[in-house]
Image (spheres, grey):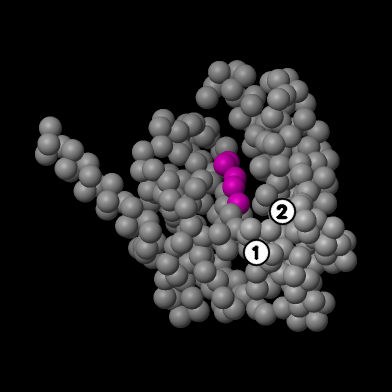
Amino acid sequence: MGIRLSFLAVIIVFFFFSCKTVPVSEEPPESKWKLEIGFEKDTFQLRELIWLDVTLTNPTDDTLRSWGLAPPCHVFFCIELTDSVGIPIPYSGPLSDVFRGPGFLIYPNEQYYNCFNLKDLFATPPGRYFVRGVYGGTFSNKISFTVVHPKGKEQEAEQSFLDAFGAPLDRPVDSDKVVQLRMLEAYPNSVYAELAAIRLLKYDEFLDRFPNSGQTRSRLTGHMMGLNDEEKIEYLESAIIKYQGTRAAKHALQLLRFEKNKKSGLR
């Protein structure tokens, strides 16, 4: 028994450190899954949210079991980031447990979608980077992006954001609400407006103004709290139509599929 426990401890430590350093791996000979990543653009301002879209597809004729795409860098799913010359950037985001329960089923040609803010996972000072996703033995396409210093109006918006939200932690959260809202209204089209809105707006108000934010999934699920199963399905169906072509619609479609499958007893 003691030998088994020691062996399990070694395995857990191995996966912890292998995920924490996020090594760039070699391409395996074959895989059952298809993994794709992408950005809405390839240049981001310093401190701007860097949303990476990740889609996992079951391209086979078989039903496959998945452990999902969140959080990144657990034993089944990792994001690899390198600098312009190929040196790996250390992963600094959250880690999950090695064992994640039974997972869920992804049926033939079905997709699972999620998106991640790379700034929550890696330090990304100005420069050029290359990113790739790994799911088990499946490697995604490799894409690049660049982080630059803001200039002109974006530089003004960044400074306004820092002035409004950079208060000491011991100051009352609501004491600067007027200043913060003023920043959001003064720079509604800035890349920093989303950062402000995440802190200020709730649920549908945020969804209406920033339907393409990666934060929309949490706003959809927040709205669904307290709804019964039928009301959840009705709300998600309306969100898919209302936010068509955005990340909010993608998240709503996936949540809708889960709700319907749960109702049918498929998952």
248 shown above or below 168: above
174 or 72, which is in the foreground? 174
Task: Tell me which segment is drawn in magenta.
Answer: 111-115
Where residue 169 sits: x, y (%)?
A: 63, 59
240 shown above or below 267: below
Would you name the residue on which mark 1 appears? Answer: 168
Where residue 115 sits: x, y (%)?
A: 60, 52
How many labels, in total? 2
The reply to whether residue 215 is visible in this rendering is yes
Residue type at numbered disc 2: Val
22 or 180, which is in the foreground? 180
Q: What residue is at 68 percent from the left and 49 percent from the top?
A: 215
Residue at disc 1, secondary structure = loop
**Quarter of image, res 236:** top right
31 sits left or right of 267 in the view: left
From mark 1 to mark 2, how far is it between C-alphas? 10 Å
Q: Earlier in the sequence, mark 1 or mark 2?
A: 1
